[in-house]
Image (spheres, rainbow, N blue to C red):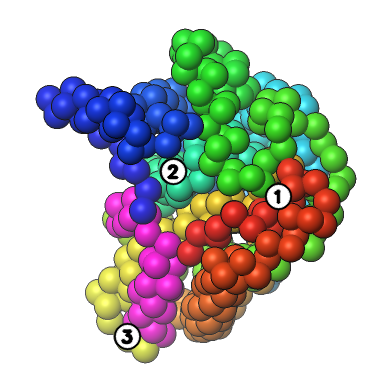
Amino acid sequence: MDEKLTLPNSGEALEDQEIHTEKALGTLPPEENPHLDKVLNRKFDLHILPWLFGIWLFSFIDRSNIGNAKLAGLPEDLGIDTGTSFNVALLVFYIPYILVDVPSNLLLKKFRAGVYLPTLITAWGIVCTCTGFTKSFAGLVVCRLLLGLFEGGILGGVIIYLAMFYRRHELLYRSGLFYCAAPLSGAFGGLLASALGRIECGGYVKWPWIFFVEGSGTVVFGIICYFFMPDTPAAARFLNDTERDWALKRMQIDASGSMPTTHVDEEKLDWYWAKMALRTPQVYLCAGIWFFLLVPLYSFSLFLPSIIAGMGYKSTIAQLFTVPPNMAGFVVGRVYCRGFIAAGTLVGIAGYIMLLVSDKNSVKYAGTFLIAMGVFQASPMLMGWVANNLAPHYVRAVGVGIVISIANCSAFIGTFIYLQRDAPKYALGHSISLGALVITLFLTGIQVAYLGWENRKRDRGDRDARLVEGDAHRLGHRHPSFRYTL
Protein backbone atom coordinates (compact mmCIF):
# COMPACT_ATOMS: atom_id res chain seq x y z
CA MET A 1 0.00 0.00 0.00
CA ASP A 2 1.18 3.45 -0.83
CA GLU A 3 2.68 5.93 1.56
CA LYS A 4 0.12 8.48 2.75
CA LEU A 5 0.82 12.17 2.83
CA THR A 6 1.14 13.32 6.45
CA LEU A 7 1.61 16.66 8.00
CA PRO A 8 4.57 17.34 10.26
CA ASN A 9 3.98 16.26 13.85
CA SER A 10 5.79 15.85 17.08
CA GLY A 11 6.56 12.19 16.36
CA GLU A 12 8.69 12.92 13.31
CA ALA A 13 11.84 13.79 15.29
CA LEU A 14 11.64 10.44 17.08
CA GLU A 15 11.04 8.61 13.81
CA ASP A 16 14.03 10.31 12.19
CA GLN A 17 16.21 9.39 15.18
CA GLU A 18 15.11 5.76 14.82
CA ILE A 19 16.08 5.80 11.15
CA HIS A 20 19.56 7.16 11.94
CA THR A 21 19.96 4.52 14.68
CA GLU A 22 18.97 1.73 12.27
CA LYS A 23 21.49 3.00 9.75
CA ALA A 24 24.22 3.02 12.40
CA LEU A 25 23.37 -0.56 13.39
CA GLY A 26 23.33 -1.67 9.76
CA THR A 27 19.68 -2.76 9.73
CA LEU A 28 18.84 -0.48 6.79
CA PRO A 29 20.44 -1.05 3.38
CA PRO A 30 23.16 1.54 2.73
CA GLU A 31 21.50 2.55 -0.55
CA GLU A 32 18.24 3.52 1.20
CA ASN A 33 17.43 6.83 2.89
CA PRO A 34 13.86 6.81 4.31
CA HIS A 35 14.21 10.23 5.91
CA LEU A 36 15.24 11.87 2.64
CA ASP A 37 12.49 9.94 0.83
CA LYS A 38 9.95 11.46 3.19
CA VAL A 39 11.32 14.98 2.61
CA LEU A 40 11.26 14.53 -1.16
CA ASN A 41 7.74 13.10 -1.24
CA ARG A 42 6.43 15.94 0.89
CA LYS A 43 8.03 18.50 -1.42
CA PHE A 44 6.79 16.77 -4.56
CA ASP A 45 3.30 16.50 -3.07
CA LEU A 46 3.27 20.23 -2.42
CA HIS A 47 4.97 21.40 -5.62
CA ILE A 48 3.86 18.84 -8.24
CA LEU A 49 0.48 17.32 -7.34
CA PRO A 50 -1.57 20.56 -7.14
CA TRP A 51 -0.68 21.40 -10.75
CA LEU A 52 -1.49 17.92 -11.99
CA PHE A 53 -4.79 18.00 -10.10
CA GLY A 54 -5.63 21.31 -11.77
CA ILE A 55 -4.64 20.02 -15.22
CA TRP A 56 -6.98 17.06 -14.96
CA LEU A 57 -9.76 19.16 -13.44
CA PHE A 58 -9.73 21.60 -16.35
CA SER A 59 -9.26 18.79 -18.86
CA PHE A 60 -12.43 17.00 -17.81
CA ILE A 61 -14.42 20.20 -17.46
CA ASP A 62 -13.52 21.34 -20.98
CA ARG A 63 -14.20 18.01 -22.69
CA SER A 64 -17.47 17.34 -20.83
CA ASN A 65 -19.07 20.80 -20.72
CA ILE A 66 -20.68 20.12 -24.07
CA GLY A 67 -23.13 17.92 -22.14
CA ASN A 68 -24.06 20.91 -19.97
CA ALA A 69 -24.28 23.16 -23.05
CA LYS A 70 -26.75 20.71 -24.57
CA LEU A 71 -29.23 21.39 -21.78
CA ALA A 72 -28.61 25.14 -22.15
CA GLY A 73 -29.82 25.20 -25.77
CA LEU A 74 -26.76 24.38 -27.93
CA PRO A 75 -28.54 21.86 -30.25
CA GLU A 76 -31.42 24.26 -30.94
CA ASP A 77 -29.18 27.26 -31.65
CA LEU A 78 -26.85 25.34 -33.98
CA GLY A 79 -29.67 23.52 -35.75
CA ILE A 80 -28.51 20.08 -34.64
CA ASP A 81 -31.21 17.47 -35.29
CA THR A 82 -32.52 15.06 -32.70
CA GLY A 83 -30.78 12.08 -34.38
CA THR A 84 -27.09 11.26 -34.00
CA SER A 85 -25.48 14.59 -34.97
CA PHE A 86 -24.83 15.55 -31.36
CA ASN A 87 -23.22 12.15 -30.77
CA VAL A 88 -20.97 12.76 -33.79
CA ALA A 89 -19.82 16.03 -32.19
CA LEU A 90 -18.91 14.07 -29.07
CA LEU A 91 -17.15 11.34 -31.01
CA VAL A 92 -14.82 13.44 -33.17
CA PHE A 93 -13.01 14.66 -30.04
CA TYR A 94 -11.59 11.17 -29.53
CA ILE A 95 -10.12 10.67 -33.03
CA PRO A 96 -7.09 12.97 -32.57
CA TYR A 97 -7.17 12.27 -28.81
CA ILE A 98 -6.35 8.63 -29.53
CA LEU A 99 -3.87 9.20 -32.38
CA VAL A 100 -1.53 11.61 -30.58
CA ASP A 101 -1.02 9.70 -27.34
CA VAL A 102 2.10 7.63 -28.08
CA PRO A 103 3.98 10.34 -30.06
CA SER A 104 3.06 12.92 -27.40
CA ASN A 105 4.53 10.74 -24.65
CA LEU A 106 7.78 10.42 -26.60
CA LEU A 107 7.97 14.19 -27.08
CA LEU A 108 7.30 14.97 -23.42
CA LYS A 109 10.91 14.90 -22.24
CA LYS A 110 12.43 16.05 -25.56
CA PHE A 111 10.53 19.34 -25.40
CA ARG A 112 10.73 19.66 -21.58
CA ALA A 113 7.71 18.55 -19.59
CA GLY A 114 7.52 21.85 -17.71
CA VAL A 115 6.96 23.65 -21.02
CA TYR A 116 5.20 20.99 -23.09
CA LEU A 117 2.32 20.23 -20.69
CA PRO A 118 1.47 23.91 -19.99
CA THR A 119 1.52 24.55 -23.76
CA LEU A 120 -1.08 21.84 -24.31
CA ILE A 121 -3.23 23.22 -21.48
CA THR A 122 -3.14 26.77 -22.81
CA ALA A 123 -3.88 25.61 -26.38
CA TRP A 124 -6.97 23.58 -25.51
CA GLY A 125 -8.20 26.39 -23.25
CA ILE A 126 -8.12 28.74 -26.22
CA VAL A 127 -10.05 26.18 -28.32
CA CYS A 128 -12.65 25.74 -25.57
CA THR A 129 -13.12 29.49 -25.33
CA CYS A 130 -13.58 29.78 -29.10
CA THR A 131 -16.24 27.06 -29.05
CA GLY A 132 -18.59 29.65 -27.58
CA PHE A 133 -18.37 31.65 -30.83
CA THR A 134 -19.52 28.68 -32.92
CA LYS A 135 -22.50 29.36 -35.18
CA SER A 136 -22.86 26.01 -36.97
CA PHE A 137 -22.57 22.26 -36.53
CA ALA A 138 -19.46 22.21 -38.75
CA GLY A 139 -17.80 24.80 -36.51
CA LEU A 140 -18.61 22.71 -33.45
CA VAL A 141 -17.02 19.64 -35.04
CA VAL A 142 -13.83 21.57 -35.87
CA CYS A 143 -13.58 22.85 -32.30
CA ARG A 144 -14.05 19.34 -30.90
CA LEU A 145 -11.34 17.96 -33.22
CA LEU A 146 -8.86 20.63 -32.09
CA LEU A 147 -9.80 20.09 -28.45
CA GLY A 148 -9.03 16.38 -28.79
CA LEU A 149 -5.74 17.14 -30.52
CA PHE A 150 -4.41 19.25 -27.64
CA GLU A 151 -5.90 17.18 -24.81
CA GLY A 152 -4.68 13.90 -26.31
CA GLY A 153 -1.22 14.01 -24.75
CA ILE A 154 -2.31 15.02 -21.25
CA LEU A 155 -3.25 11.80 -19.45
CA GLY A 156 -0.24 9.79 -20.64
CA GLY A 157 1.96 12.82 -20.13
CA VAL A 158 0.85 13.23 -16.54
CA ILE A 159 1.44 9.54 -15.77
CA ILE A 160 4.95 9.66 -17.26
CA TYR A 161 5.61 12.94 -15.47
CA LEU A 162 4.63 11.42 -12.11
CA ALA A 163 6.90 8.44 -12.74
CA MET A 164 9.88 10.82 -13.05
CA PHE A 165 9.43 11.97 -9.45
CA TYR A 166 7.98 9.09 -7.39
CA ARG A 167 8.98 5.51 -6.67
CA ARG A 168 6.75 2.80 -8.12
CA HIS A 169 4.96 1.98 -4.87
CA GLU A 170 4.22 5.69 -4.35
CA LEU A 171 2.60 6.25 -7.76
CA LEU A 172 -0.80 4.73 -7.08
CA TYR A 173 -1.72 7.08 -4.26
CA ARG A 174 -0.60 10.11 -6.25
CA SER A 175 -2.46 8.91 -9.34
CA GLY A 176 -5.59 8.65 -7.23
CA LEU A 177 -5.11 12.16 -5.87
CA PHE A 178 -4.84 13.83 -9.25
CA TYR A 179 -7.46 11.65 -11.00
CA CYS A 180 -10.16 12.36 -8.43
CA ALA A 181 -10.31 15.77 -10.13
CA ALA A 182 -12.39 14.02 -12.84
CA PRO A 183 -15.58 13.55 -10.76
CA LEU A 184 -14.91 16.88 -9.06
CA SER A 185 -14.94 18.49 -12.51
CA GLY A 186 -18.43 17.09 -13.01
CA ALA A 187 -19.56 18.71 -9.79
CA PHE A 188 -17.96 22.05 -10.67
CA GLY A 189 -19.23 21.81 -14.21
CA GLY A 190 -22.79 21.32 -13.04
CA LEU A 191 -22.63 24.23 -10.61
CA LEU A 192 -21.04 26.57 -13.14
CA ALA A 193 -23.40 25.55 -15.92
CA SER A 194 -26.44 26.19 -13.76
CA ALA A 195 -25.30 29.82 -13.41
CA LEU A 196 -23.52 30.45 -16.72
CA GLY A 197 -26.35 28.88 -18.69
CA ARG A 198 -28.60 31.77 -17.70
CA ILE A 199 -26.39 34.64 -18.94
CA GLU A 200 -27.65 36.63 -21.92
CA CYS A 201 -25.17 39.33 -22.93
CA GLY A 202 -23.64 40.80 -26.09
CA GLY A 203 -25.75 38.67 -28.40
CA TYR A 204 -24.58 35.41 -26.81
CA VAL A 205 -27.35 33.60 -24.98
CA LYS A 206 -26.83 30.95 -22.32
CA TRP A 207 -24.61 28.07 -23.54
CA PRO A 208 -21.76 30.14 -25.13
CA TRP A 209 -20.93 31.53 -21.70
CA ILE A 210 -20.20 28.04 -20.42
CA PHE A 211 -17.36 27.82 -22.95
CA PHE A 212 -16.24 31.44 -22.59
CA VAL A 213 -15.75 31.31 -18.83
CA GLU A 214 -14.48 27.75 -18.43
CA GLY A 215 -12.11 28.02 -21.41
CA SER A 216 -10.68 31.33 -20.21
CA GLY A 217 -10.03 29.84 -16.78
CA THR A 218 -8.05 27.02 -18.43
CA VAL A 219 -5.91 29.50 -20.39
CA VAL A 220 -5.01 31.41 -17.22
CA PHE A 221 -4.15 28.18 -15.39
CA GLY A 222 -1.99 26.96 -18.28
CA ILE A 223 0.04 30.17 -18.30
CA ILE A 224 0.61 29.94 -14.53
CA CYS A 225 1.86 26.34 -14.93
CA TYR A 226 4.74 27.57 -17.12
CA PHE A 227 6.34 29.18 -14.08
CA PHE A 228 5.95 26.40 -11.51
CA MET A 229 6.22 22.95 -13.14
CA PRO A 230 9.81 21.57 -13.25
CA ASP A 231 10.88 19.40 -16.18
CA THR A 232 12.53 16.66 -14.09
CA PRO A 233 13.81 16.30 -10.49
CA ALA A 234 17.16 17.67 -11.67
CA ALA A 235 15.44 20.92 -12.67
CA ALA A 236 13.36 21.29 -9.49
CA ARG A 237 14.35 24.61 -7.93
CA PHE A 238 12.61 23.74 -4.66
CA LEU A 239 15.18 20.97 -3.99
CA ASN A 240 18.66 21.47 -2.60
CA ASP A 241 21.66 19.66 -4.12
CA THR A 242 21.47 16.70 -1.74
CA GLU A 243 17.75 16.21 -2.34
CA ARG A 244 18.19 16.55 -6.09
CA ASP A 245 20.92 13.91 -6.20
CA TRP A 246 18.90 11.49 -4.12
CA ALA A 247 15.75 12.08 -6.21
CA LEU A 248 17.65 10.81 -9.25
CA LYS A 249 19.51 8.00 -7.50
CA ARG A 250 16.45 6.53 -5.80
CA MET A 251 14.73 6.05 -9.17
CA GLN A 252 17.60 3.78 -10.22
CA ILE A 253 17.39 1.85 -6.95
CA ASP A 254 13.63 1.50 -7.29
CA ALA A 255 13.95 0.06 -10.80
CA SER A 256 15.36 -3.20 -9.36
CA GLY A 257 17.90 -3.63 -12.14
CA SER A 258 15.45 -2.73 -14.92
CA MET A 259 16.84 0.77 -15.49
CA PRO A 260 19.93 1.75 -17.53
CA THR A 261 22.85 3.31 -15.66
CA THR A 262 21.84 6.82 -16.79
CA HIS A 263 19.50 9.00 -14.74
CA VAL A 264 15.92 9.62 -15.86
CA ASP A 265 16.80 13.07 -17.17
CA GLU A 266 19.70 11.64 -19.22
CA GLU A 267 17.89 8.73 -20.93
CA LYS A 268 17.63 8.86 -24.71
CA LEU A 269 14.96 7.39 -26.96
CA ASP A 270 15.95 3.91 -28.12
CA TRP A 271 13.54 1.92 -30.31
CA TYR A 272 14.64 -1.21 -28.47
CA TRP A 273 12.52 -0.02 -25.53
CA ALA A 274 9.58 0.80 -27.79
CA LYS A 275 9.62 -2.76 -29.18
CA MET A 276 9.76 -4.15 -25.65
CA ALA A 277 6.58 -2.24 -24.77
CA LEU A 278 4.84 -3.60 -27.87
CA ARG A 279 5.66 -7.17 -26.84
CA THR A 280 4.52 -6.91 -23.22
CA PRO A 281 1.35 -8.90 -22.30
CA GLN A 282 0.28 -6.69 -19.39
CA VAL A 283 0.09 -3.69 -21.75
CA TYR A 284 -2.74 -5.35 -23.66
CA LEU A 285 -4.42 -6.77 -20.57
CA CYS A 286 -4.52 -3.30 -18.97
CA ALA A 287 -5.70 -1.82 -22.27
CA GLY A 288 -8.60 -4.28 -22.36
CA ILE A 289 -9.59 -3.60 -18.77
CA TRP A 290 -9.47 0.16 -19.29
CA PHE A 291 -11.32 -0.06 -22.63
CA PHE A 292 -14.38 -1.61 -21.06
CA LEU A 293 -14.16 0.57 -17.96
CA LEU A 294 -14.14 3.76 -20.06
CA VAL A 295 -17.37 2.84 -21.84
CA PRO A 296 -19.46 3.69 -18.73
CA LEU A 297 -17.03 6.36 -17.51
CA TYR A 298 -17.14 8.45 -20.67
CA SER A 299 -20.85 7.98 -21.29
CA PHE A 300 -21.64 8.83 -17.67
CA SER A 301 -19.49 11.99 -17.78
CA LEU A 302 -21.06 13.18 -21.02
CA PHE A 303 -24.67 12.13 -20.53
CA LEU A 304 -25.32 12.45 -16.79
CA PRO A 305 -27.17 15.78 -17.32
CA SER A 306 -29.35 14.09 -19.96
CA ILE A 307 -29.96 11.02 -17.77
CA ILE A 308 -31.13 13.24 -14.91
CA ALA A 309 -33.20 15.39 -17.27
CA GLY A 310 -34.85 12.15 -18.40
CA MET A 311 -36.15 11.74 -14.86
CA GLY A 312 -38.31 14.81 -15.47
CA TYR A 313 -36.13 17.61 -14.07
CA LYS A 314 -35.78 20.90 -15.93
CA SER A 315 -32.49 22.29 -17.26
CA THR A 316 -31.18 24.26 -14.26
CA ILE A 317 -32.34 21.68 -11.72
CA ALA A 318 -30.87 18.85 -13.80
CA GLN A 319 -27.52 20.68 -13.90
CA LEU A 320 -27.53 21.07 -10.13
CA PHE A 321 -28.52 17.43 -9.61
CA THR A 322 -25.32 16.32 -11.36
CA VAL A 323 -23.26 17.73 -8.50
CA PRO A 324 -23.95 15.24 -5.63
CA PRO A 325 -23.18 12.03 -7.60
CA ASN A 326 -19.94 13.51 -8.88
CA MET A 327 -18.97 14.61 -5.37
CA ALA A 328 -19.55 11.03 -4.21
CA GLY A 329 -17.21 9.85 -6.96
CA PHE A 330 -14.62 12.41 -5.84
CA VAL A 331 -14.69 11.21 -2.22
CA VAL A 332 -14.48 7.51 -3.09
CA GLY A 333 -11.82 8.23 -5.73
CA ARG A 334 -9.37 8.94 -2.93
CA VAL A 335 -9.40 5.21 -2.05
CA TYR A 336 -6.24 3.79 -3.57
CA CYS A 337 -6.10 0.01 -3.12
CA ARG A 338 -5.81 -2.01 -6.36
CA GLY A 339 -8.40 -4.47 -5.08
CA PHE A 340 -10.95 -1.72 -5.48
CA ILE A 341 -10.81 -2.06 -9.28
CA ALA A 342 -12.87 -5.22 -8.90
CA ALA A 343 -14.91 -3.83 -6.02
CA GLY A 344 -15.61 -0.63 -7.94
CA THR A 345 -16.96 -2.50 -10.94
CA LEU A 346 -19.36 -4.38 -8.65
CA VAL A 347 -20.63 -1.09 -7.21
CA GLY A 348 -21.08 0.34 -10.71
CA ILE A 349 -22.92 -2.79 -11.83
CA ALA A 350 -25.39 -2.33 -8.97
CA GLY A 351 -25.95 1.29 -10.03
CA TYR A 352 -26.83 0.40 -13.62
CA ILE A 353 -29.16 -2.35 -12.46
CA MET A 354 -31.02 0.24 -10.37
CA LEU A 355 -31.36 2.52 -13.42
CA LEU A 356 -32.67 -0.33 -15.56
CA VAL A 357 -35.17 -2.06 -13.29
CA SER A 358 -36.69 0.76 -11.22
CA ASP A 359 -39.42 3.20 -12.21
CA LYS A 360 -38.85 5.41 -9.16
CA ASN A 361 -36.75 8.54 -9.67
CA SER A 362 -35.33 8.28 -6.16
CA VAL A 363 -33.96 4.80 -6.87
CA LYS A 364 -32.62 5.84 -10.27
CA TYR A 365 -30.92 8.88 -8.83
CA ALA A 366 -29.36 6.74 -6.09
CA GLY A 367 -28.06 4.50 -8.86
CA THR A 368 -26.11 7.42 -10.35
CA PHE A 369 -24.25 7.73 -7.04
CA LEU A 370 -23.17 4.09 -7.20
CA ILE A 371 -22.03 4.46 -10.80
CA ALA A 372 -19.92 7.52 -9.98
CA MET A 373 -18.40 5.79 -6.95
CA GLY A 374 -17.68 2.66 -9.00
CA VAL A 375 -16.23 3.88 -12.29
CA PHE A 376 -14.25 6.98 -11.29
CA GLN A 377 -12.06 5.35 -8.66
CA ALA A 378 -10.90 2.47 -10.90
CA SER A 379 -9.11 4.56 -13.54
CA PRO A 380 -6.34 5.87 -11.25
CA MET A 381 -5.82 2.30 -10.05
CA LEU A 382 -5.21 1.26 -13.65
CA MET A 383 -2.88 4.18 -14.27
CA GLY A 384 -0.75 3.16 -11.32
CA TRP A 385 -0.92 -0.48 -12.38
CA VAL A 386 0.37 0.29 -15.87
CA ALA A 387 3.15 2.65 -14.74
CA ASN A 388 4.29 0.35 -11.91
CA ASN A 389 4.77 -2.67 -14.17
CA LEU A 390 6.70 -1.14 -17.07
CA ALA A 391 10.33 0.00 -16.96
CA PRO A 392 12.47 1.93 -17.79
CA HIS A 393 11.22 5.39 -18.85
CA TYR A 394 10.73 4.91 -22.59
CA VAL A 395 9.13 1.47 -22.17
CA ARG A 396 6.73 3.14 -19.78
CA ALA A 397 6.16 6.06 -22.15
CA VAL A 398 5.31 3.83 -25.11
CA GLY A 399 3.36 1.28 -23.05
CA VAL A 400 1.23 3.90 -21.31
CA GLY A 401 0.55 5.53 -24.68
CA ILE A 402 -0.55 2.21 -26.20
CA VAL A 403 -2.82 1.45 -23.24
CA ILE A 404 -4.47 4.86 -23.34
CA SER A 405 -4.83 4.81 -27.14
CA ILE A 406 -6.51 1.40 -27.16
CA ALA A 407 -8.63 2.19 -24.11
CA ASN A 408 -9.89 5.46 -25.55
CA CYS A 409 -11.26 3.64 -28.59
CA SER A 410 -14.12 2.84 -26.21
CA ALA A 411 -15.32 6.37 -26.96
CA PHE A 412 -16.62 5.07 -30.29
CA ILE A 413 -19.05 3.04 -28.19
CA GLY A 414 -19.60 5.35 -25.23
CA THR A 415 -20.58 8.39 -27.29
CA PHE A 416 -23.24 6.52 -29.29
CA ILE A 417 -25.08 4.43 -26.72
CA TYR A 418 -27.15 7.28 -25.27
CA LEU A 419 -29.30 8.45 -28.18
CA GLN A 420 -32.05 11.04 -28.03
CA ARG A 421 -34.54 8.53 -29.43
CA ASP A 422 -34.02 6.34 -26.35
CA ALA A 423 -34.94 9.14 -23.90
CA PRO A 424 -36.00 9.22 -21.15
CA LYS A 425 -35.14 5.65 -20.04
CA TYR A 426 -31.94 5.18 -22.08
CA ALA A 427 -32.19 1.41 -21.64
CA LEU A 428 -29.67 0.70 -24.42
CA GLY A 429 -26.99 2.89 -22.87
CA HIS A 430 -27.50 1.50 -19.38
CA SER A 431 -27.42 -2.11 -20.64
CA ILE A 432 -24.21 -1.71 -22.66
CA SER A 433 -22.50 0.06 -19.76
CA LEU A 434 -23.57 -2.75 -17.43
CA GLY A 435 -22.14 -5.40 -19.77
CA ALA A 436 -18.87 -3.45 -20.12
CA LEU A 437 -18.39 -3.48 -16.34
CA VAL A 438 -18.96 -7.23 -16.20
CA ILE A 439 -16.19 -7.72 -18.78
CA THR A 440 -13.95 -5.29 -16.82
CA LEU A 441 -14.35 -7.47 -13.73
CA PHE A 442 -13.45 -10.63 -15.67
CA LEU A 443 -10.33 -9.13 -17.29
CA THR A 444 -9.13 -7.74 -13.95
CA GLY A 445 -9.10 -11.29 -12.58
CA ILE A 446 -7.06 -12.50 -15.55
CA GLN A 447 -4.53 -9.68 -15.09
CA VAL A 448 -4.04 -10.46 -11.40
CA ALA A 449 -3.58 -14.15 -12.17
CA TYR A 450 -1.00 -13.49 -14.91
CA LEU A 451 1.13 -11.05 -12.88
CA GLY A 452 1.04 -13.34 -9.84
CA TRP A 453 2.12 -16.31 -11.98
CA GLU A 454 5.03 -14.32 -13.45
CA ASN A 455 6.18 -13.16 -9.98
CA ARG A 456 6.17 -16.75 -8.71
CA LYS A 457 8.37 -17.86 -11.61
CA ARG A 458 10.87 -15.12 -10.77
CA ASP A 459 10.80 -16.10 -7.10
CA ARG A 460 11.72 -19.65 -8.10
CA GLY A 461 14.56 -18.43 -10.32
CA ASP A 462 12.87 -19.56 -13.55
CA ARG A 463 13.73 -16.24 -15.24
CA ASP A 464 17.40 -16.06 -14.14
CA ALA A 465 18.56 -17.32 -17.53
CA ARG A 466 17.74 -13.89 -18.94
CA LEU A 467 20.79 -12.50 -17.14
CA VAL A 468 23.13 -14.37 -19.52
CA GLU A 469 21.16 -13.53 -22.66
CA GLY A 470 22.84 -10.10 -22.96
CA ASP A 471 23.22 -6.80 -21.12
CA ALA A 472 21.27 -7.06 -17.84
CA HIS A 473 20.60 -3.32 -17.97
CA ARG A 474 18.67 -3.86 -21.20
CA LEU A 475 16.14 -6.26 -19.67
CA GLY A 476 13.84 -3.54 -18.35
CA HIS A 477 10.85 -4.95 -16.47
CA ARG A 478 11.86 -8.43 -17.74
CA HIS A 479 14.78 -8.41 -15.26
CA PRO A 480 14.52 -11.39 -12.84
CA SER A 481 14.72 -9.10 -9.79
CA PHE A 482 11.84 -6.91 -11.01
CA ARG A 483 8.52 -7.78 -9.33
CA TYR A 484 5.13 -6.79 -10.71
CA THR A 485 2.70 -5.06 -8.38
CA LEU A 486 -0.66 -6.75 -7.96
On the image, the x and y values in percent for residue 466 come to 75, 59
Q: What stretch is highlighted in magenta?
A: 328-356
**Numbered marks: total:** 3
Q: Which mark is residue 241?
A: none
Does the magenta-highlighted stretch encompass residue 323?
no
Q: Check disc 3 and give the amino acid type.
A: Asp
Instruction: Identify the residue at image location x=33%, y=29%.
Output: 23
Q: Residue 476 carries which label?
A: 1
Magenta region, main secondary structure? helix
Q: Which residue is drawn at 52% across and 18% down?
A: 244
Report the disc number at residue 359: 3
The first of marks 2 and 1 along the sequence is: 2
Whole-number angstrom distance, CA of label 3 to CA of label 1: 54 Å
Q: Which residue lies furthest to the left in this view?
A: 10
Label 3 or label 1, whichever lies nearer to me, is 1
Please name the residue shown 60% across and 18% down the image: 234
Measure the alpha-carbon separation of dots 3 and 2: 44 Å
Q: What residue type is labelled 1?
A: Gly
Q: Which of marks 3 and 2 is in front?
A: 2
At x 54%, y 77%, the residue is 449
- Is disc 1 placed on a helix, strand or loop? helix
Residue beneath disc 2 = 170
Residue count near mark 1 (Cα–Cα under 10 Å), binned few <14, some 14–19, many ≥20: many
